[in-house]
Image: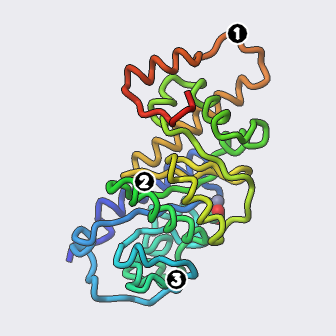
Amino acid sequence: MKNILEAPFVLEFGKITANMYRLGWDERNGGNLSLLLDEEVVSKYLDLNKVIRNIPFSFDGKELAGRIFMVTGTGKYFRNVADDPERNTGIVRISEDGTYAELLWGYNDGGKMTMEFPSHMMAHIERLKIDSEHRVVMHCHPNNILAMTFVHSLDEREFTYTLWQMITESIVVFPDGVNILPWMMCGNNEIGAATAEKLKTARVCVWAQHGVYGVGKDLDEAFGLVETVEKAAEVYLKIANMPWKQTITEDQLRIVARDFKLKVREGWL
Ligand code: 2HA
Ligand code: ZN
């Protein structure tokens, strides 16, 4: 068996969470991250017949039976993941009946998956239906996206349009736009189902007055997506209270869409 602490996916998970912490996206135990792993890759590092313990959950995970995920732990700080991944994260396999997770590695202080595990798994289920390359669900609390949900209309098209106008590359990175959930209680199946529904039509779902969900085919892609939305939100907040002398016009956005051959969200441009 190879040493799992040297596995590229464990090292990358540590680097991404450290970056997210340093960018101010994940204060204290804020945010959570899950990465779908390839069974064959994991089997080089772990005996897949050895289950440490079973961790029950209360949503229907049958569609993910047998799938293996690396997931941040509940109450754990992103700041600490890279230094001690075996305490702050876990590698779990969804049981055949989809009612519990089999812990294969990690959570070595008796911990378990993030409180947002239902949202993450429901999001994985929906995104895998749309995109077979999908692997990552990222949740965090970036300051500017959060701030924007207090002062901007929460109409999804209007919110997206403002973000597209802030940086030329916005529409290139998220031509599918951003969807938005109004404030809801977090951590339960209800917000999980609502988030998964929103992620059917966009790879970003803003949780008003809370944070954001971003998905992608790898950690870099999900990170880059959230990073670009956050940057656009930051530019917006810098200019929101100033008189605008010019902006990127709708016609100019169409030129970007044409030249980059983008699949822009139907009817939004
Ligand atoms: O504390 O971010 O949404 C973890 C969270 C809950
Ligand atoms: Zn959160």
| Mark 3–mark 2 distance (CA, rounded to whole Å) | 22 Å
| Mark 1–mark 3 distance (CA, rounded to whole Å) | 56 Å
| Quadrant housing the N terminus | bottom left
Residue 245: numbered disc:
1
* Front disc: 1 or 3: 1
Nearest the eye: 259 or 135: 259
* Front disc: 2 or 1: 1
Q: Where is residue 191 drawn, in percent x and y?
A: 65, 64
Name the amino acid, label 2: Lys
Q: Where is residue 260 drawn, in percent x and y?
A: 38, 25
Are the residues tagged 1 and 3 within 8 Å (C-beta)? no
At x 45% / y 61%, what residue is drawn?
82
Q: Where is residue 144 drawn, in percent x and y?
A: 67, 39
Residue behind label 1 places its C-beta within 8 angstroms of ligand 2 = no
Residue 98: numbered disc:
none
Of mark 2 and mark 1, the one earlier in the sequence is 2
Q: Where is residue 204 drawn, in percent x and y?
A: 54, 47
Q: Quadrant of ligand 2?
A: bottom right
SS of the residue under disc 2: helix
